[in-house]
Image (tube, helix red, strand yellow):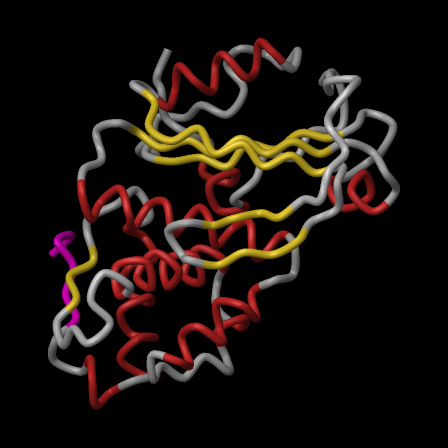
Amino acid sequence: MSKRFLQSLISAGLLFFTQNHQIPSALPQRENKVRLSALNLEFYAPTNFVYSFEGRVPDVGNRLLELNQKYGLPLDFGFTDNTPAEGYTYSVWDKKYDSFLDSLTNGGYVVSHVFLSSKLKGEEYLFARGHEETHTLIDFNKLGLLKDALERQGINSYNLENEHKEVICNVGGFYSLLLLNPKAQEIEIPKQGYREYLPRTLDWLVENNKERFNHSLSSTNN
């Protein structure tokens, strides 16, 4: 079985399941601060949301298989021959509700697993983690946190939400790299499974801070 992801699910950033899944019956009730370490951002979520960052896994495809089995989904769900398996945000919710947000707002449990390939090293890993963490911001309508952070770095972000979700998440990955050296004049974006959206990501960054990045942005995808 090919361990590659369904393109439409990668574009969506989350797996949305409406049947045949099982949610743990007893999850802890607590003050629920979601910490997004690569972005250095945090926000409070409802206590019925569990954010599980699993870090590096030996094989993203195998981990997806394990979660499909855990939640009662077909073992081949989510695989395709087209998209590299470098990172994933995998979410399930209470089967009484029809959607992620419906479950979240009505007290049903929502669980998100985030995991990245152990093959990613250094800046590749950081970019992928920032990308996936941005999906979480989008799903909770917290993109404003990233926009404000970009503005503090001198990057105009007023129109970011108008871009494709994967472009937005690539900008989040870029911001994670920028945090390593906030005064950097040259930023190289690693080659990722999100490469389809890298050209537009680079264009957006140049358009929104030409003075700083016009001649200094590049990608290892070139």
Residue 8: image x %, image y %? 51, 40
Q: Nearer the viewer, residue 91 or 45?
A: 45
Question: Looking at this rendering, what residue extends furthest in the bottom direction?
Answer: 211
Which span of residues is magenta-colored?
Answer: 217-222
In the figure, 117 relative to 220: above or below? above
Q: In the visual, does 107 lie left or right of 116?
A: right
Q: Residue at x 55, y 49 (%)?
A: 136
| Residue 44 belongs to magenta span | no
Q: In the visual, does 39 lie left or right of 159?
A: left
| Residue 220 belongs to magenta span | yes
Residue 148: image x %, image y %? 49, 76
Q: Quadrant of residue 82?
A: top left
Residue 102: image x %, image y %? 82, 43
Q: Residue at x 82, y 36 (%)?
A: 98
Residue 57: image x %, image y %? 34, 22
Q: Nearer the viewer, residue 145 or 67?
A: 145
Q: Residue at x 54, y 32 (%)?
A: 52
Q: In the visual, does 37 lie left or right of 67?
A: left
Q: Quadrant of residue 72?
A: top right
